[in-house]
Amino acid sequence: MSADILLVGPALDDPGGIANYYVTLLSRLGPNRNPTYEYLQIGRMGGAAGVSHYLRDPYRLLRHIRDSKPGVVVLNPSMNVRCFIRESIFAWLIKRCSHANLIVFWHGWDAEFAKTVEKYLTAIYRISFKKADTTLVLTSTAAETVQAWGQSYVVSETTMFSDEFLRPDAAPGSRRLSASVKVLFLSRIEQEKGVYQTIDAVCNLLRQNVPVELTIAGAGSELDNVMDYCRRLPTSLARSIHFAGYVRNAQKAELLAAHDLYCLPTSHGEGMPVSVLEAMAAGLPVITTGAGGLSDFFLDGVMGRVVQLDSVDDLTRNLKELIDDPLACLRMSDFNREYAFNQFSSSEVGGRFNAHCVELLPP
């Protein structure tokens, strides 16, 4: 199959943000899109373990480019050691062995690893990622960093959500708190995402006789440990904590619509967590931190609450204050829905991404 634009990324059924972005993008553009897009999966195939794909992927990518001759190739690294090494090889091969223009779209951004790159790995950056014709970033920190490294054409972008999370029929002021307030933690289940802090904060509220329930949705390496942690809680607390498993698409939209507050007290090196945008589109007030790209747009007290990193007490206090102020939650709900529609909907963001690619297509 030949296409104008080749997108390179993980399996589209991967639970991460990159796969979600391109599932949404390709769905939005439709099957008869012009220019044409093709998606090349890299990484583990069919969930297989091992490292053979690190040797296989550069060969597959180069062969694919030589066979299909795309005008533009889009790489989607994150700023961490594994992605940096793997995709710097991809970028070097693309610019050295093909005539395709290159877009590098940075997603996750680990600021500490970026310092390591600046100290030890700038030579690798210069012969690979710096050769990109366009660099897209999700955070102001990432933009400032790559510009300091000499990147010439850097565009700040946003991630996006599927329009199925929008509720255009929802009238202003229609999202009222349930009698037993339903808090949702929806994310990849990893320790740095703040799942344990969320559980502990909800347990603190239950001990204060606050009517609250917590749903944990998602998959990840920490899920079994989290479930075991909850099983060891007193029954009076554990019965208010529910697990929904991994959800996506319509099932995820239904889950968001059934909850009152969204909680993600992450310390992870986020780009721009799409689950926050989905929650806003569904009209949920959001309790989160200033990690990654969140600090670039999130308005404390307007969209929800910004809490301190790794502070269960601060998270408990902010949850309690929102639960005690349903009128503030109504205002946040209406604001978030409108803001998400204007800034992060697939029609807006997908159109901008398509324009970046079209601009680099050869005549």
Image: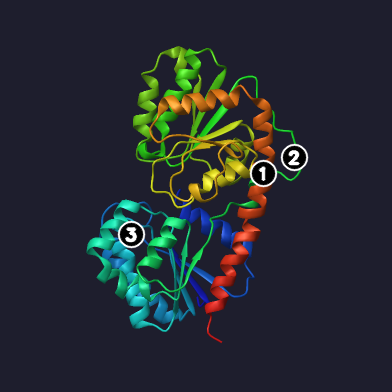
Closer to the chain start, of discs 3 and 2, is 3
**Dot 2 amino acid type:** Ala
The figure's colour scheme reads rainbow
Residue 200 in the image: above or below residue 145: above
At 57% from the left and 17% from the top, the residue drawn is 211
Q: Which residue was labeled with disc 2?
A: 170
User: What kind of element bears circle 3?
Assistant: helix
Whether residue 158 is visible, yes or no, is: yes
How far apart in space, not on screen, are marks 3 and 2 (Cα)? Answer: 41 Å
* Alpha-carbon span between mark 1 and mark 3: 34 Å
Would you identify the image quadrant in which residue 55 lies?
bottom left
Q: Using residue 25 as the reference point, say whether residue 15 is left or right of it.
A: left
Residue at 53% over, 26% down: 319
Q: Residue at x 48, y 40 (%)?
A: 246
Q: Quadrant of residue 158?
A: bottom right
The numbered dot on residue 337 is 1
Residue 80: where, in percent of width, then height?
Answer: 32, 55
Residue 279 left/right relative to 151: right
Q: Amino acid at mark 3?
A: Cys
Q: Amino acid at mark 1?
A: Arg
100 sits to left or right of 59:
right
Q: Quadrant of residue 29?
A: bottom right
Task: Name the residue carrying label 3.
Answer: 83
Residue positioned most to the left: 120
Q: Quick one: 106 or 317, which is closer to the camera?
A: 317
Q: Are marks 1 and 2 in contact (CB under 8 Å)?
A: yes
Above or below 203: residue 349: below
How many circles with numbers are drawn on the protein? 3
Point out the tag, 1 or 3, that comes first from the N-terminus.
3
State the SS at label 2: loop
